[in-house]
Image (cartoon, coloured by chain):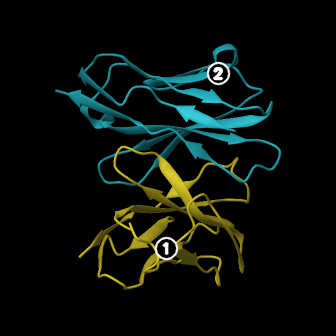
């Protein structure tokens, strides 16, 4: 089945620790995105990548980093500089670059602070 | 600047009732795209519909229908004869045309359909 796989489903971070959230897609989509969702809020864009080896900051990139070495993979690292990392993180992809195309989402990763 | 407002934070209905979820948007572009997504309790967002600014025709898909009115900058979503499986958070989103690198989401409306 084609889709987006996010792992782990739940993640706990200790003070001062970096953690990496995995996102893999087998849809052969060019573009991939990371969003953060806080309770009662809409989604906010962290980073996006329109093509391999290229990525752009979204609205709330501070304290996060990404890489796009392969078309199918777009991992997100939450660094210790992100002081309030507790949130639900969603990865998405779309068939081509730009925000006009529908996005397909993974099941999300819920990150909490220990 | 683009903005999406979903004024209804939560709605609760009884099964088989019709329900309308409101979405009002702001944009200075003449070319833009509007979306609705459904987020069930499992967490992933599911794409429901995309509409571009030049297509004002209303759309119906089974029990779902969408009413796009540029005059009032609204893109409302109606579920007819609601079912318990419709319980979810629904998001409206806006992307401006002209190569915009942004998709802006509303804060969502949580719909609960009670048996």
Question: Residue B73's mark?
Answer: 2
Q: Residue at x 56, y 57 (%)?
A: A45
- Whether residue A73 is visible, yes or no, is no
The chain assigned the colour cyan in the figure is: B
Q: Quadrant of the N terminus of chain B?
A: top right
- Whether residue B82 is visible, yes or no, is yes
Q: Residue at x 29, y 82 (%)?
A: A14
Q: Assess disc 2: are there few (<14), some (14-19) or many (≥20) residues with their C-alpha within 10 Å of its C-alpha.
A: some
- Are discs 2 and 1 located on one and the same chain? no
In what element is the residue under mark 2? loop
Q: Position of residue A69 (x, y in %)?
A: 65, 84
Above or below — where is A112 with respect to B26?
Answer: below
Question: Residue A32's mark?
Answer: none
Residue A113, quarter of picture:
bottom left
In what element is the residue under mark 1? strand
Q: Position of residue B70 (x, y in %)?
A: 69, 19
Residue B104, quarter of picture:
top right
Residue that extends furthest to the left in the rendered view of this protein:
B115
Front-most of residues A57 and A67: A57
Q: CA distance from mark 2 to mark 1?
A: 35 Å
Pinpoint the chain carrying mark 1: A
Above or below — where is B100 with respect to B85?
Answer: below
The residue tagged 1 is A23
Indicate left or right for B60 with B99 as reference: left
The mark lying in front, picked from 2 and 1, is 2
Q: How many marks?
A: 2
Q: Assess disc 1: are there few (<14), some (14-19) or many (≥20) residues with their C-alpha within 10 Å of its C-alpha.
A: many
Chain A shown in which color? yellow
């Amino acid at each position: 089945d084609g889709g987006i796989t996010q792992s782990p489903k739940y993640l706990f971070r200790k003070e001062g620790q970096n953690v990496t959230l995995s996102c893999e897609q087998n849809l052969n989509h060019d573009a991939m995105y990371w969003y953060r969702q806080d309770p009662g809020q809409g989604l906010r864009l962290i980073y996006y990548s329109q093509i391999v080896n290229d990525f752009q900051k979204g609205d709330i990139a501070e304290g996060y980093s990404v890489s796009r070495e392969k078309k199918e993979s777009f991992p997100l690292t939450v660094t210790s500089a992100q002081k309030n990392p507790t949130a639900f993180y969603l990865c998405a992809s779309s068939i081509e670059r730009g925000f006009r195309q529908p996005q397909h989402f993974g099941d999300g990763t819920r990150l909490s602070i220990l | 600047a683009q903005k999406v407002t979903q004024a209804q934070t939560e709605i609760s209905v009884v099964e088989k009732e019709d329900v309308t979820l409101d979405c009002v948007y702001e944009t200075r572009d003449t070319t833009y795209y509007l979306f609705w997504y459904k987020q069930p309790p499992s967490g992933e967002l599911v794409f429901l519909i995309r509409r571009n600014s030049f297509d004002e025709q209303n759309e119906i898909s089974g029990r779902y229908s969408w009413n796009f009115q540029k005059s009032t900058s609204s893109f409302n979503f109606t579920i007819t004869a609601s079912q318990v499986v419709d319980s979810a958070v629904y998001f409206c989103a806006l992307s401006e045309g002209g190569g915009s690198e942004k998709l802006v989401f509303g804060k969502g409306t949580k719909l609960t359909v009670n048996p």
